Amino acid sequence: MEVGLVLFGSFLILLFLGVPVAFAMGIGTLLGLISGDYNLQMLPLMVSRGTSNFTLIAIPYFVLAGNLMNSGGITKRIFDWADACIGHVTGGLAQVNVFASMIFSGISGTASADAAGLGLVEIEAMDSKGYDRAFSTAVTLASSVIGPIIPPSVPFIIYAMLANVSVAKLFMGGLIPGIVVGAILMLTNVILEKTGRVKMPETTPFSWMRLKKTTKDGFFALLAPIILVGSISSGFATATEAGIIAVFYSIFCGLYYKELTIKRLLKSMEVTIFSTAMIMLLIGIGSGSGWVATAERIPAMLSDILFNLTTNKYMLLIIINVFLLFLGMIIDGVTIKLIMVPILLPIIDSIGMSRIHFGIMQTLNGLIGYATPPVGIGLFIMSSITDLKLEEVIKSFWIFYIPLIIALILIIFFPGITMWLPNLLFE
């Protein structure tokens, strides 16, 4: 127990002192090894072992594909088509914002790619129509949460490695929950307009000619999520192979639309290398932390504590989710996954919950943290691309915590939302 306190206590202290997450976790793990009198050679071995998993090869491909989509003019065409489809309904461009994010989620594997790429297109379009900029920012941040839930998903790939489950099953398990999140956000937009809480400009009348034109212009962009999700669900391609397909298809689309220049290609690769390096460093060090926690029987001790509080499955899940939501306020989602998944899996197994179900639930929980102060990365991304103060973004976003929490509760208590599709396709 003392080693666990040293491990996690030093990590949190260093985090609050402003030390980068990866280094804070690495120093905490090193101090844990020293206090437990373990061989210090275990740390580099665990880091190397943690990053050697074949499943992780898919990560750089999906990150690169998302960056190429943003650089190749695909995001704008997806948004224009979504606008032509549903821009006339109640909520107007707020609904288009969510719908476009759901489509783009089938291409990009991260929330940040959705927020920083498609998000900028969405906010500029809403600004031009007269929407309040703070509200536009809030809707964009909320819709970006869908990104890693609808496949493909980088967080799912990391979870699959940690939990030793099928990436394909996780991807298919996230499809319906992602649609549920999107539907609840769209319902929220309707309520906000109908109650007068948010003043929304008049919508543009539906036009078959415009829909035909945007479908023709964006045909190859719209085909991308169908190809990716279809290749995985049909068994035609593994997650890694689908990532490679995504990269080549992104390059093809960028060249076809004549928007992917050499400069943009190199910039996309540079951003991908940086993002992937940070993710892999976190995964490697997280493996070391997980090894120390397991060696010190921390999962077993936490299990005993929770089962002493209650043996009810759903009460345990509520306690776990409240704790994870609290962690999301101070730690990013990937770090929470690396630290907590190995600790919580024995508890999840003991209550008979599917690891696929838990993975979807935990990922959505972490994505709510992505938009929660003080450490919510999404808040900082939206503040930087809109030039709004962080306080303004937080103030405008708080109403969207309600639909996101409702979606999380539905996923917790109705496992069929998650498990129906993977059971249908893979059992």
Image: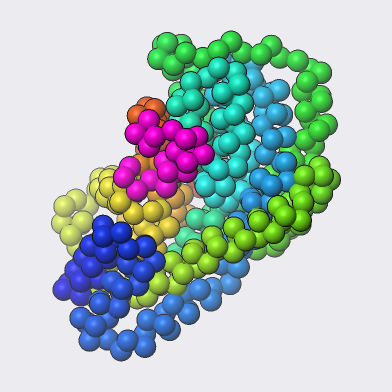
Q: Quadrant of the C terminus?
A: bottom right
Residue 344 position within the rendered picture, expressed as x and y whole percent measured from the top left: 32, 60
Q: Quadrant of the N terminus?
A: bottom left
Q: Which colouring convention does the figure follow?
A: rainbow
Residue at 60% over, 21% down: 128
Q: Quadrant of residue 11?
A: bottom left
Residue at 44% over, 50% down: 363
Residue at 69% over, 59% down: 266
Magenta-drawn stretch, dominant element (helix, strand or loop): helix
Q: Quadrant of residue 415?
A: top left
Q: Looking at the image, can residue 404 be seen?
A: yes
**Residue 384 relative to residue 206: left or right:** left
Q: Quadrant of residue 287?
A: bottom left
Q: Nearer the viewer, residue 209 or 302?
A: 209
Q: Is residue 32 above or below residue 68?
A: below
Q: Looking at the image, can residue 313 be seen?
A: no
Q: Is residue 28 above or below residue 87?
A: below
Q: How many marks?
A: 0
Indicate yes or no whether the magenta region holds residue 318. Answer: no
Residue at 76% over, 56% down: 262
- Extent of the magenta region: 373-392
Residue 335 position within the rendered picture, expressed as x and y whole percent measured from the top left: 39, 60
Q: Is residue 52 above or below residue 83?
A: below
**Residue 295 relative to residue 135: left or right:** left
Indicate yes or no whether the magenta region holds residue 390. Answer: yes
Residue 119 position within the rendered picture, expressed as x and y whole percent measured from the top left: 56, 37
Residue 161 position within the rendered picture, expressed as x and y whole percent measured from the top left: 49, 66
